[in-house]
Image: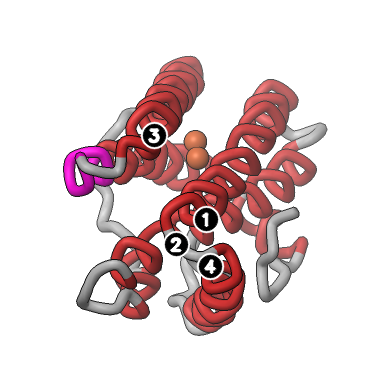
């Protein structure tokens, strides 16, 4: 269960698949960033041993996704170039409270929200790509399961550090905030923007 507070419209995915180079370059950057976010947690909170192994595994999976996307780009003659990041993550993190342990909880739930939104949109992309680029549709379909698991993992890990009832309550606020960020995102292609 993804617990998103809003649903992306199918026409977002239909419009996004019109610009595959943009979509795939962004996807590659996002996978790399997801790995970096997990590793950053491991370094920021070395005393929370419960985080270390699961996040190491998650980071490894994200780097595998990164390599899969790079291979898909190479096969389509798309170059991995720098891209102006969307404001999605930055705006999402505005909800993070400045002091611990609230800071840890909020950051974990923001990561859970990113994983959930990515999962939801990859599913839509996989459907929209069917018949246009079946190989890419399969690639997105294959990523959906991992991102759903990553979403759950961030919530579960938070519950091992903070009172589970507090995690559930805060998760609702973070998801509500995430839905507002998405609803007011600039209109441009990509996983974390509107169309
Ligand atoms: Fe991923
Ligand atoms: Fe992920």
Disc 2 + disc 1, Cβ < 8 Å = yes
The answer to whether marks 4 and 1 mark residues whose Cβ atoms lie closer than 8 Å is yes
Which numbered disc, 2 or 3, marks the residue that appears first in the sequence? 3
Q: Which residue is mark 4?
A: 167
Mark 3–mark 1 distance (CA, rounded to whole Å): 15 Å
Magenta span: predominant SS is helix
> Which residue is labeled 1 in the image?
159
Measured Cα–Cα span from mark 4 to mark 1: 6 Å
Q: Nearer the viewer, mark 3 or mark 4?
A: 4
Question: Would you say 56 lies left or right of 75 here?
Answer: left
Residue 58, placed above or below residue 38 = above
Residue 6, position in %: x, y?
Answer: 69, 74
In space, the residues marked 2 and 4 are separated at their CA atoms by 7 Å
Q: Which residue is mark 2?
A: 162
Q: Position of residue 66 (x, y in %)?
A: 41, 27
Q: Which mark is residue 55?
A: 3
Please tell me in which quadrant of the rendered image residue 103 appears.
bottom left
Of label 3 and label 1, which has the lower sequence position? 3
Rate crowding at label 1 as few (under 14), some (14 to 19) or many (20 or more) other CA atoms within 10 Å.
some
At which x and y percent is residue 195?
A: 58, 69
Tag 3 near tag 4, CB within 8 Å = no
């Amino acid at each position: 269960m993804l617990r998103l507070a809003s649903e992306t419209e199918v026409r977002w995915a239909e419009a996004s698949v019109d610009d595959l180079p943009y979509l795939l370059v962004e996807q590659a950057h996002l996978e790399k960033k997801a790995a970096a976010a997990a590793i950053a947690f491991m370094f920021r909170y070395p005393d929370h041993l419960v985080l270390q192994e699961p996040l190491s595994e998650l980071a490894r999976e994200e780097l595998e996704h990164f390599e899969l996307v790079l291979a898909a780009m190479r096969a389509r003659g798309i170059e991995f170039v720098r891209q102006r990041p969307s404001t999605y993550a930055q705006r999402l993190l505005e909800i993070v409270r400045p002091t611990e342990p609230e800071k840890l909880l909020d950051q974990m739930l923001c990561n859970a929200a990113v994983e959930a939104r990515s999962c939801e949109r990859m599913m839509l992309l996989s459907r929209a790509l069917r018949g246009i680029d079946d190989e890419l549709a399969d690639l997105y379909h294959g990523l959906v399961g991992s991102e759903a698991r990553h979403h759950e993992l961030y919530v579960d890990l938070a519950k091992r550090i903070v009172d589970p009832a507090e995690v559930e309550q805060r998760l609702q606020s973070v998801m509500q905030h995430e839905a507002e960020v998405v609803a007011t995102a600039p209109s441009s292609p990509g996983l974390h923007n509107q169309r």
